Amino acid sequence: MSLVSIIMPYYKKKLFVEDSVKSILNQSYKNFEIILINDDIEKKDFIETISNIDQRIRLIHNNKNLGAGLSRNKGIKYSNGEYIAFCDCDDLWKKNKLENQLSFMKQFDLDFSFTSYDIIDEDSNFITKRKADDNINFKKLRNSCDIGLSTVIIKKNIFDNQRYEFANLKTKEDYVLWLKLAFDEIEMKGIDQNLTSWRKNKDSLSSSTIQKLMDGYKVYRVYLGYGVFKSLFCLTVLSINFILKN
């Protein structure tokens, strides 16, 4: 039974992180470790209490605030699993997420998979859902970011290539990684099962329109190396597709 390392950065999500951790601990698939990276460097007592819930949780304290992307990179380096999964500390997993997704990946010999997911509010009420495409290519992904971070599982050996890491951005740090993988034609296959709930949190960085626009521009200009006008064009297409989804 393959070991799965679940990378979970924590930063000021005290209201939600315990439920997120418990949704992982309640998985039907039991062979996993949770690598909890504390990025809230001024407060340690609370997250230490959470880490003591189960012996499969490993807590790592950052010495300085790194942000979610760099914290995930750090967590991957500490991981022991054959597979790497991600869960943000305000999202929730359905009970059969790991079991179903790993079975799917082994059946099709995949290095990367993602799933459909629900969108919920701060009180865990259902809002809507997002359907996972069967296959994502670079062009599709460049025009619309349709992969939910907390739905993804990746074979760990993918990260042997140092090119593949999360970007140093406040938002869209995962989008940069997905684009690199798609550009290099890593097969990225979706499962149309709602195995994750993504929490729409009005106070999160991902809800800041200005921050998302700034980071979206950097995705194209800095990380893909596009010119100014092409970067602005791609950002416009991305923004339009985001609006159409909502």
Image (tube, rainbow, N blue to C red):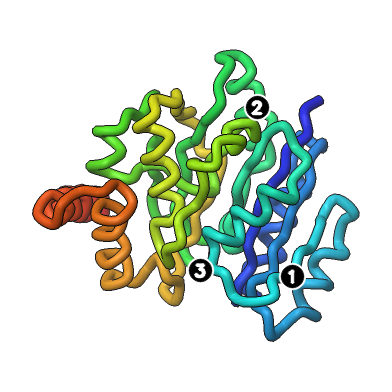
Sort mark 2 into few (<14), some (14-19) or many (20+) by Cα contacts within 10 Å. some
Q: Amino acid at mark 2?
A: Leu
Measure the alpha-carbon separation of dots 3 and 1. Answer: 26 Å
Mark 3 residue element: loop
Which label sits in the foreground, 2 or 1? 1
Residue pictured at 27% horizontal, 72% vertical: 210
Measure the alpha-carbon separation of dots 2 and 1. Answer: 29 Å
Foreground residue, 38 or 19? 38
Task: Report which residue position mark 3 lands on.
Answer: 122
Q: Amino acid at mark 1?
A: His
Sort mark 3 into few (<14), some (14-19) or many (20+) by Cα contacts within 10 Å. few
The percent position of residue 26, horizontal first and vertical second, equals: 76, 46
Task: Report which residue position mark 1 lands on.
Answer: 61
Foreground residue, 194 or 114? 114
Residue pictured at 69% horizontal, 49% vertical: 77
* Residue 88 against residue 43 in the figure, above or below: above
Give the side of residue 32 with respect to residue 236, left or right.
Answer: right
Mark 2 residue element: helix
The percent position of residue 15, horizontal first and vertical second, equals: 63, 74
Which label sits in the foreground, 3 or 1? 1
Give the side of residue 85 with respect to residue 220, left or right.
Answer: right
Q: Amino acid at mark 3?
A: Glu
* Residue 243 against residue 15 in the figure, above or below: above
Which badge, 3 or 1, is on the more N-terminal residue?
A: 1
Measure the alpha-carbon separation of dots 3 and 2. Answer: 29 Å
Residue pictured at 64% horizontal, 67% vertical: 10
* Residue 144 against residue 173 in the figure, above or below: above
Task: Report which residue position mark 2 lands on.
Answer: 102
Q: Is residue 240 visible?
A: no
